[in-house]
Amino acid sequence: MSLVVIGTVAFDALETPFGKTDKIIGGAATYIGLSASYSLKPVKLVAVVGDDFPQSDILLLEEHGVDTEGLQIKQGEKSFFWSGKYSNDLNSRETLATELNVLADFDPILPDSYQDCKYLMLGNLTPQIQRLVIQRLVNRPKLIVMDTMNFWMDVALDELKTTIEMVDVLSINDEEARQLSGVHSLVKAAKIIMGMGPKYLIIKKGEHGALLFHKNKVFYAPALPLEEVFDPTGAGDTFAGGFIGYLAATDDISFDNMKRAVIHGSAMASFCVEKFGTERLLNLSQEEIEAREQQFADLVAVVPATAVQNA
Amino acid sequence: MSLVVIGTVAFDALETPFGKTDKIIGGAATYIGLSASYSLKPVKLVAVVGDDFPQSDILLLEEHGVDTEGLQIKQGEKSFFWSGKYSNDLNSRETLATELNVLADFDPILPDSYQDCKYLMLGNLTPQIQRLVIQRLVNRPKLIVMDTMNFWMDVALDELKTTIEMVDVLSINDEEARQLSGVHSLVKAAKIIMGMGPKYLIIKKGEHGALLFHKNKVFYAPALPLEEVFDPTGAGDTFAGGFIGYLAATDDISFDNMKRAVIHGSAMASFCVEKFGTERLLNLSQEEIEAREQQFADLVAVVPATAVQNA
């Protein structure tokens, strides 16, 4: 089923307790696209880069099944650049540099071949641009999933709410859910946020897993306890890409299938953090992915007591 | 199967964003005993109070199946008292007062009728006193579960390690696991701590659930997302009481049964936080407990995809 992804394709420079990188390929749409490509190909990309972006990285995306017809290359301009440094426990990070460059006046143009879009993933970006993509699709997709972050709650809350109202699934982290709803309890926050429009809410809790809410139902996907997290960059985007990729590949948006999609997304994210940047996402096998999904299933598996329970 | 619990029986004065209490019955062994009593009776208590402790509270424990033969009442002395105030998000608390009183020279005397102990729960207390109880049992119990806290890691680390070496299951929270092991990754921390003696390690993560480690196996019991947490006091002890009560009642210490015991303990803890102090633990029905356990099962339940998975 046709999947369109919009988001940033960018350069990142990362520093974690385990080392640092020069400019490497990054951006929400890069992680989403690579992650989703393990579920279905092509993943139709809408993004913008400058002429400093290496042709080899574009080819890399193409090789993984990412359709770059909707990737604009702006001559004479530079690609979006983000640089960050993680704390020793990896639980917080400091932004060292943000250079918008081509993103400053990004106009998301959809090629005609993208108009068959049935599944739309709005990666983290200005809410106005996310909304433009919805408006430029002639037919409303079957499912729209939106990722965003606290930055837009701080600087463009009204715009953000207008876009949130138009989507089916919103994906944010726990602190963002608290900020957006104004309440601390995640159960209450979920009700308030679903009242803003989305029928489904995913609350990402990092090393503590993710919650999926729908009406009065809730599903808890724990994160796999990992021996070592190497670089958390892109984990949330990789989760989102795995989530919508799974749904698009199975073309089933029932709550039961969304649970499976959350587990698949969690498995993909658990790979992402094992190496710097996108490295681990470039060479996964279906066997590795299925084995990791099985680990998630085993993690919470309880064999019901057959005989005596509470005496 | 005979269950012995040692810990504090005390007065607490609590303040949460939802209100405050005068002196009410509290203490680790109180919560553990009440929680375990829903799995089996009697729960044989070893503790000490002063002559200020109301006979009515002792009767309350007796009515719930807590055997108080091992509860010493020190004439002319006062009971242990703790007073604390929780932050608005309930994630941290400030100790307003700690009066050791009778605890200062507590000598844990075991009645002869406790010598049939098969399951021993060492509630949070001076590690020397926890150890004395093990040493005073003629036969080593089938299973010893120990709860402790960061305070003992700060002031009595060597004593603590000596006691930890003697137990089967250690129950601590995530920050305590990091402090005790000296590493941040909980997977690595678990290996280090199990290397100190315990064959099983439970890491409590509050609203994020609990992890059970054994050899190379790990089980993740999520916490039920709650609309409102009223008072977190005693949640960890209630968890521990439910855990060992379930194991003692079923007399099965396989890893599979420990998983079920963790779910049962989590369910008991989820009740505890709904009201002030022990209030919610005083009138639970087996139907309520089973329904809550079912909620925990539903929370992580995934129906396997029957046909098409990843395309």
Image: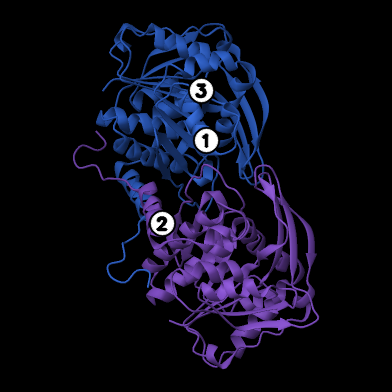
Chain colours: A blue, B purple
The crowding category of the residue bearing disc 1, from other C-alpha atoms within 10 Å (few below 14, some 14 to 19, many at least 20), is: some
Image check: B201 left or right of B311?
A: right
Residue A84 in the image: state x and y as whole percent.
64, 31
Residue A74 in the image: state x and y as whole percent.
51, 7
- Residue A132 visible somewhere in the drawing: yes
What chain is tagged by disc 2? B
Q: Nearer the viewer, residue A82 or A223?
A: A223
Residue B28, image quadrant: bottom right
- Residue at the image position 34 percent from the left and 35 percent from the top: A258
Q: Nearer the viewer, residue B73 or A155?
A: B73
Image mark for residue A124: 3
Q: Residue furthest front?
A: B56
Residue A21, image quadrant: top right
The crowding category of the residue bearing disc 3, from other C-alpha atoms within 10 Å (few below 14, some 14 to 19, many at least 20), is: many
- Residue at the image position 33 percent from the left and 40 percent from the top: A260
Q: Nearer the viewer, residue B291 or A307?
A: B291
The amino acid at mark 3 is Asn
Image check: B176 left or right of A1?
A: right
Q: Mark 2 = which residue?
A: B288
Image check: B206 left or right of A43?
A: right
What chain is tagged by disc 3? A
Distance from Cα at disc 2 to Cα at disc 1: 23 Å
Image mark for residue A188: 1
